[in-house]
Amino acid sequence: MRILSYDIESTTGSHSDASMCTFGYCIADEKFNIIEQRDIVMRPRGKRYESKIKLHYDKAFIKAQKPFPDFYEEIKNLFKTSDLIIGFSVSNDVDFLNNACELYGLEKIEYEFLDIQLLHKTVEKLPNPRGLESVAQEMGVEYLAHRSDEDARVTLLLLKSITEKLNLTIEEVLSKYHITQGVNSEEETTPCTNGVYTKKELNYLINDFIEHNYRHNRRYKGGLSYKSFAFSDEIKFGDVDLYRRMMKRIYELNGRVGQIENCNHFVSVKGEFTEKEKRSLSLRNEGRKRITPITLEDALKIFGTLPELDFSKDVELIKKHRREQRQKRLEKKKENLKIKNPK
């Protein structure tokens, strides 16, 4: 594996004026051995030098360098030849690079990227993301803060530290914490996400699981035949892995899983109904169809040993789903433009 860690500094801090003045990077192998480290200094397009961050090069030196287009092919090749691209709070760097490409009339560089700041926040269960200087101090790493190649190096060391602490490969870490890489494509840029899926996305995972695992034998009368189970949202969306394991077990025992309106057992953590669930119950033939509420603990006793399942494909499923949704939004946007601007 070839890992590219990169960072960008700007003379103004703006993402819209092609003020990028340094592109720093580190190339490492799968064992985090640094193969190459370099800080490319370039002349920004504008004349403003109002960055709140103290740059490591003086104004005269930066102005004397070649502009971004002279380094474009070299930088593009770095992305093209790398298997994993990382950065710290990398969405800002993605914007800097895209802006420079746009204002200089160059083709947008397409790639997937991993935000190590987000990964660190997720793994450490932090309420707020930490800055790179703070993280470096915690790791005991000395470096030149806000020099692009040095920021890239510390970002790489942080990823190495995370994998070593968890004793997992990079792929296993991403799978364990449901991290989805960001995508910088010609159409749009989507950020790296940390597995905090929306309710619609969780429903997508659940429906995909049902599609590939549902089974019911009408002729078989044993196990959980004639029994159907509905689950509270707290269980379904609070622990989607447990919910899918329970569904799998119910199918194995010839039971069914459905909605509260058409099931005869309702499973919640405490065996109680919320106000929303009570309203759903009122639709059950005006209350004439009986439903038995049971606690999660009692339900697990009924189900017995749950199967161990591998949910490592969730990340790819969600990534695919998001791409499909983005494509639908783009197509809808194009249709709306056609309606507003007919030929």
Image (cartoon, rainbow, N blue to C red):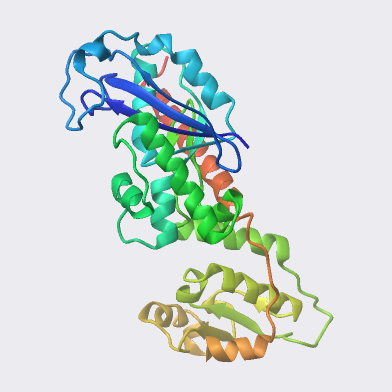
**Residue at image location 36% in from the left, 36% down from the top:** 151
The location of residue 312, given as percent across then percent down, is: 63, 57
- Quadrant (top left/top right/bottom left/bottom right) for the C terminus: top left
Above or below, 75 relative to 69 = below
**Residue at image location 34% in from the left, 27% down from the top:** 96
Q: How many marks?
A: 0
The location of residue 185, given as percent across then percent down, is: 49, 29
Query: Residue 177, can we see it?
Result: no
Q: Is residue 306 left or right of residue 220?
A: left
Q: Is residue 187 left or right of residue 46?
A: right
Above or below, 45 relative to 301 = above
- Quadrant (top left/top right/bottom left/bottom right) for the N terminus: top right
In depth, the one of 299 and 89 nearer the eye is: 89
**Residue at image location 76% in from the left, 87% down from the top:** 223
The location of residue 208, given as percent across then percent down, is: 63, 58
Above or below, 77 relative to 87 = above
Query: Residue 135, can we see it?
Result: yes
Q: Residue furthest right?
A: 219
In depth, the one of 241 and 274 nearer the eye is: 241
**Residue at image location 51% in from the left, 59% down from the top:** 165
Q: Is residue 261 left or right of residue 218?
A: left
In depth, the one of 221 and 91 nearer the eye is: 91
The location of residue 305, given as percent across then percent down, is: 69, 83
Q: Is residue 213 left or right of residue 261?
A: right
